[in-house]
């Protein structure tokens, strides 16, 4: 019997790959746990692959083909969709973010990528890659701005951002860039597209002193958390870890200024940048 046809990469290939995995697993009479055991992963991980919230890596694809008798289908298509416009350490998180129903994020030093303006993103990437060619920076900025189209939908995903006050006061690109960047965030908040809070310096020690944090929830898959460091990032699905990170974010929300107070502070700092009043 011939194997399934390769996927059409123009029609959400990762979601289609997940659907094919579910079909092949059920045809083989295996539960998610039974397929996960020989792969040394949990049943919930298999469920995330089927739901499209996790990327299928090549080593898993090869083993799945062997276990399910799919004649190289998953290896071929996994390789075909592996390329990403995002850095390797962030690619899987960006893919998950694109289908999340809820994103909650604590940002320490920078305005979150989903909320950045073009000029702000250019400054950030140039600082990260001081010797890169302009076309490389342009591609990185274009990918970041493309991500922001997630917010074109008026309601989904829910985006709740807690910004450390340092993200407001660290000058990226000068007064004009910062004025535009902060007013963009304020505009999204005033339009009720996002919920934003500021964690003020006066709050002192807090629940996420170690760094930034992102939580994502999905309609048909378990929640994920994403933690990152310079040129490193990890998507986590361990329920105990996600529960702990959820508590951390809840504590940050409780410690931060209210959304109304936060909006007032963001607009005030933007006005100070506009008038050149934040320089020593």
Image (spheres, rainbow, N blue to C red):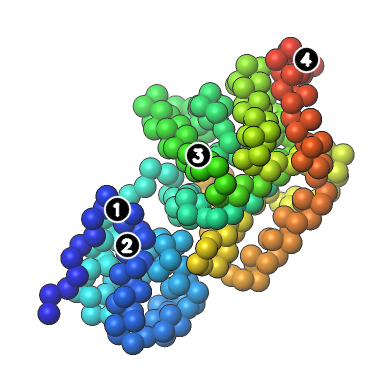
Give the labeled residue for mark 4. 277
Residue at 70 percent of width and 65 percent of height: 244
**N-terminal of the two: label 3 or label 2?**
2
- What number is the disc on residue 249? none
**N-terminal of the two: label 1 or label 3?**
1
Residue at 43 percent of width and 80 percent of height: 32
Give the labeled residue for mark 3. 152
Front tag of 1 and 4: 1
Q: Are marks 1 and 4 in contact (CB under 8 Å)?
A: no
Q: Does residue 108 sit above or below 171 in this rendering?
A: below
Query: Under tag 4, what secondary structure?
Result: loop
Front tag of 3 and 2: 3
Front tag of 3 and 4: 3
Give the labeled residue for mark 1. 11
Q: Does residue 268 sit above or below 62 in this rendering?
A: above
Q: Does residue 108 sit above or below 60 in this rendering?
A: above
**Distance from label 3 to label 4 (Cα)?**
33 Å
**Distance from label 1 to label 3 (Cα)?**
20 Å
Q: Are marks 2 and 1 in contact (CB under 8 Å)?
A: yes
- What number is the disc on residue 16? 2
């Amino acid at each position: 019997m011939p194997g399934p046809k390769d996927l059409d990469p123009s029609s959400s290939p990762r979601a289609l790959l997940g659907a094919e995995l579910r079909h092949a697993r059920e045809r083989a009479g295996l539960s998610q746990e039974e397929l996960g055991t020989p792969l040394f992963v949990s049943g919930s991980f298999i469920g995330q692959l089927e739901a499209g919230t996790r990327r299928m890596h090549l080593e898993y694809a090869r083993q799945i083909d062997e276990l399910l008798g799919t004649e190289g289908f998953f290896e071929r298509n996994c390789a075909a969709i592996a390329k990403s416009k995002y850095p390797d350490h962030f690619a899987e998180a960006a893919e998950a973010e694109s289908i999340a129903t809820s994103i909650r994020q604590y940002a320490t030093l920078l305005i979150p990528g989903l909320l950045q303006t073009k000029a702000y993103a250019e400054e950030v990437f140039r600082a990260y890659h001081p010797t890169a060619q302009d076309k490389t920076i342009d591609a990185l900025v274009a990918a970041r701005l493309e991500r922001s189209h997630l917010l074109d939908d008026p309601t989904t995903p829910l985006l709740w951002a807690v910004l450390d006050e340092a993200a407001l006061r660290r000058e990226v690109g000068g007064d004009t860039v910062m004025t535009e960047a902060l007013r963009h965030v304020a505009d999204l908040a005033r339009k009720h597209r996002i919920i934003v809070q500021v964690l003020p310096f006066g709050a002192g020690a807090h629940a996420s002193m170690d760094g930034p944090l992102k939580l994502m929830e999905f309609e048909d898959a378990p929640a994920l958390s994403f933690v990152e460091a310079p040129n490193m990032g990890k998507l986590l699905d361990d329920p105990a870890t996600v529960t702990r990170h959820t508590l951390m974010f809840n504590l940050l929300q409780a410690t931060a200024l209210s959304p109304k107070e936060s909006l007032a502070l963001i607009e005030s700092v933007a006005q100070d940048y506009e008038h050149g009043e934040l320089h020593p």
